[in-house]
Amino acid sequence: MRPLFCEIRLNYLRENYQILKKIHGKKLLAVIKANAYGHGAVQCAQALHDIADGFAVAFLEEAIELREHGITRPIVLLEGTFDAKEYDLVEQYDLWTVIHQQSQLELFLAHDWRKPTTVWLKMDSGMHRTGFFPHQFAAAYTALSQSDKIANIVKMTHFSCADEAERSMTDMQIESFDLGCHGLTGEESIANSAAMIRFPEARRDWGRAGLALYGVDPTGEFSGSLKPVMRLSSRIFAERILQPHEPIGYGANFYTKRSTRVGLVACGYADGYPRNAPNETPILVKGLRTKIIGRISMDMLTVDLNDSHEGVGDEVELFGDLINVQEIADAAGMIPYEILCNIKRAKRVYLK
Ligand SMILES: *Cc1c(COP(=O)(O)O)cnc(C)c1O
């Protein structure tokens, strides 16, 4: 059996949720869009069900899957609806949808709601992707709040740069949000993972934790201990000794400098490991750090075994406890979000 495993440590997920909830205060949505950043949305939601205040997904189909697996906590649709018919299902499945543009607002008001419902109204405070401009926000809020179809409006916005060292963009967005919300009552939600860690003033009624929930600190500044939920591991399944000045792998992009013991690892880019991870990307063999040499193939990759006494049969950690997925992302010119979302084909093991 091919020894590539993707362990999902659900106990770490729960610990991370509790740490983040304590930091943010009040209520915290567990963001489990995109199959919980590759971790398995249903399994993650079930693991958090008794402690999570609610969940966030990108769109309707993701939410329905959760409802059909017994998730009864609040679920927010971060992208909102795509057409009028979706409001029937929003109602049927008891979901909270985001309204980020006028057409969604009009279709929402046109829908024949049987009982008043909660919506999340989104402001564009400076990211300029979605949301009502600050000067239009009060009008949208008023149109909704005057309707008897509304039980509750949660005011929200999203940051473009909360994880970057430069703080001024986020400061500016918080200021725009507060100005645009002036005089409007009700709950607020503005912080993603990075903002709840770095910007105390972004901690409002509802936090929205994604990456940090999975144990990856997007800021590099968090002093607490988030635990990586995903661990990708495999084994060395072949080894050979190459003479100095011999090429390895596709494109012959690595030449040995000395006599080199090379291990073959069962993991490749078809499993979601980044193909552009360069020579020297860190990897762990039986607990010892070494490096990838040669290009990543579809089903396998090659590592330098010289400095260790390890070989065939030994366990390899691609990332997880001692190799942080951030290191792989940095080496490959990616972000950890992408790598986690991409992992596939590996056998999944859910640990309680
Ligand atoms: C994905 C998403 C989040 C979570 O962001 P992280 O950086 O992963 O914490 C929060 N809010 C919105 C609107 C999102 O789309």
Image (spheres, helix red, strand yellow):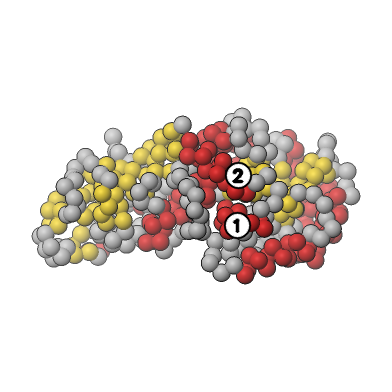
The answer to whether 156 is drawn above or below residue 171 in the figure is: above
The quarter of the picture where the N terminus appears is top left
In this view of the protein, which residue sits in the foreground, 250 or 179? Answer: 179
In this view of the protein, which residue sits in the foreground, 186 or 342? Answer: 186
Q: Which mark is residue 21?
A: 2
Q: Which mark is residue 195?
A: 1
Q: Residues within 10 Å of mark 2 (few under 14, many from 20)?
A: many
Q: Is residue 308 left or right of residue 89?
A: left
Q: Residue at x 17, y 63 (%)?
A: 256
Instruction: Please provide percent x and percent y for residue 229.
Output: 45, 43
Q: From this viewpoint, which residue is outermost toward the front?
A: 223
Q: Is residue 138 left or right of residue 196?
A: right
Mark 1 and mark 2 residues within 8 Å of each other at the beta carbon: no
Q: Is residue 254 visible?
A: yes
Q: Is residue 98 visible?
A: no
Q: Residues within 10 Å of mark 1 (few under 14, many from 20)?
A: many
Q: Residue at x 86, y 55 (%)?
A: 142
Instruction: Please provide percent x and percent y for residue 260.
Output: 14, 57
Instruction: Please provide percent x and percent y for residue 29.
Output: 63, 44
Residue type for callout 2: Lys
Q: Residue at x 31, y 58 (%)?
A: 281
Residue 133 placement: quadrant: bottom right
**Nearer-N-terminus badge (1/2):** 2
Measured in 3D between alpha carbons, the distance from the residue under mark 1 to the one under mark 2, in whole angstroms, is 13 Å
Q: Regarding mark 2 in the picture, which secondary structure is present there?
A: helix
Q: Residue at x 13, y 63 (%)?
A: 258
Residue type for callout 1: Ala
Q: Regarding mark 1 in the picture, which secondary structure is present there?
A: helix
